[in-house]
Image: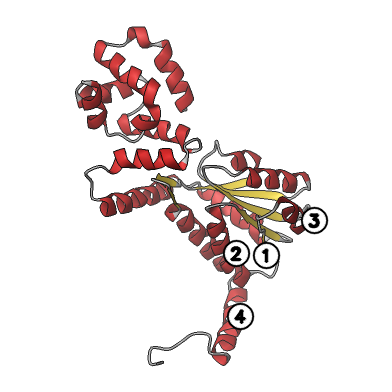
């Protein structure tokens, strides 16, 4: 963890070489900026070579500079204000092709999910949702839109789905008045973690509901309260939270649920197609 990394740097400062002390000093004072610098840029800033920066990361026990950088990013993601994010992004994208850099960042996060996703945990989440008495979907702030996306498609698969509106605390409790054992709450939460989400999950947990978390890592508050979880990195890009990886993970979840339900889903969509056609819901290519 990044906190322990900073403690390690402080404890071992006397054992570092002159160049490493420069790196260590800068990180201790400016870790929020260092987290978004390349090894080359950090080296130039403190007056050492790129290879010295890479060796410093290895000295701390990381398998390379990117690993150390990710550790720093994880520590600050839930703490940075929007203004600090914009400033960090200015350093991160200075002189770059922003379009290419942002898209490449999203591609990298998708690869990370593919290689790191726990398939058994994924199946466990599918089981919990499929067997739920009632499904509640919760997401606040930027996660609201992810929750709405999941809600739209789950409503096509199940009758027992409620999207929890998070505009007022009192209204939240009224919506969850009947939640209890046998119900599943899908809690979607990414940095900066919303207190509304945490408090609502605690309430649902106290009423005996099963908590399924969709979040970014095992340190997430909702992960700590969950019975099962899906993890996907939410990349911090300037003031924007990139939800590409979480949405892709949700797509996989929806497809897995539909596959499990088999003929029931086919019958549902056959009926829906008839309704859509009867009322002209969708236009055709030759419509004017």
**Crowding near the residue tagged with mark 1, few <14, some 14–19, many ≥20 C-alpha atoms within 10 Å:** many
Disc marking residue 267:
4
Q: From the image, which quarter does the C terminus lie in?
A: bottom left
Task: Say which residue label 3 marks.
Answer: 177
Q: Quick one: label 3 or label 1, which is nearer the N terminus?
A: 1
Disc marking residue 259:
none
The answer to which of 271 and 30 lies nearer the viewer is 30
Q: CA distance from mark 1 to mark 2?
A: 7 Å
Task: Say which residue label 1 marks.
Answer: 161
- Image quarter of residue 264: bottom right
In the rendered image, the vertical position of residue 23 relative to residue 285, given as above or below = above
SS at badge 2: helix
The structure residue drawn at horizontal position 30% and vertical position 38%, both measured from the top left corner, is 91
Q: Quick one: label 3 or label 2, which is nearer the N terminus?
A: 2
Q: CA distance from mark 1 to mark 4?
A: 19 Å
Q: CA distance from mark 4 to mark 2?
A: 20 Å
Q: Quick one: label 1 or label 4, which is nearer the N terminus?
A: 1
> Residue 213, position in %: x, y?
60, 48
Task: Say which residue label 2 marks.
Answer: 151
Left or right side of 22 for 217:
right
Q: CA distance from mark 4 to mark 3?
A: 32 Å
The structure residue drawn at horizontal position 30% and vertical position 51%, both measured from the top left corner, is 104
- Image quarter of residue 25: top left
């Amino acid at each position: 963890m990044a906190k322990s990394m900073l403690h390690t740097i402080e404890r071992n400062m006397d054992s570092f070489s002159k160049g490493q002390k420069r790196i260590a000093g800068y990180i201790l004072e400016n870790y929020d900026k260092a987290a978004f610098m390349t090894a080359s840029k950090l080296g130039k800033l403190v007056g050492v070579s790129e290879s010295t920066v890479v060796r410093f990361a290895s000295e701390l026990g990381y398998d390379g500079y990117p690993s150390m950088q990710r550790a720093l990013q994880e520590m600050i993601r839930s703490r940075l204000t929007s203004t600090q994010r914009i400033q960090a992004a200015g350093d991160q994208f200075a002189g770059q092709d922003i379009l290419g850099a942002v898209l490449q960042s999203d591609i990298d996060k998708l690869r990370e999910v593919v290689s790191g996703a726990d398939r058994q945990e994924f199946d466990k989440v599918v089981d919990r949702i499929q067997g739920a008495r009632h499904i509640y979907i919760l997401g606040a702030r930027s996660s609201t839109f992810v929750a709405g996306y999941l809600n739209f498609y789950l409503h096509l698969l199940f009758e027992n789905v409620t999207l929890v509106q998070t505009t007022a605390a009192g209204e939240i409790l009224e919506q969850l008045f009947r939640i209890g054992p046998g119900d599943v709450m899908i809690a979607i939460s990414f940095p900066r973690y919303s207190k509304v989400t945490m408090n609502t999950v605690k309430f649902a947990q106290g009423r005996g509901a099963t908590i399924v978390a969709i979040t970014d890592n095992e340190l997430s508050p909702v992960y700590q309260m969950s019975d099962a979880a899906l993890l996907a990195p939410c990349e911090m890009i300037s003031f924007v939270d990139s939800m590409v990886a979480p949405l892709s993970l949700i797509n996989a979840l929806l497809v897995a649920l539909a596959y499990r339900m088999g003929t029931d889903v086919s019958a549902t969509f056959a009926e829906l197609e008839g309704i859509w056609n009867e009322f002209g819901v969708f236009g055709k290519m030759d419509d004017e």
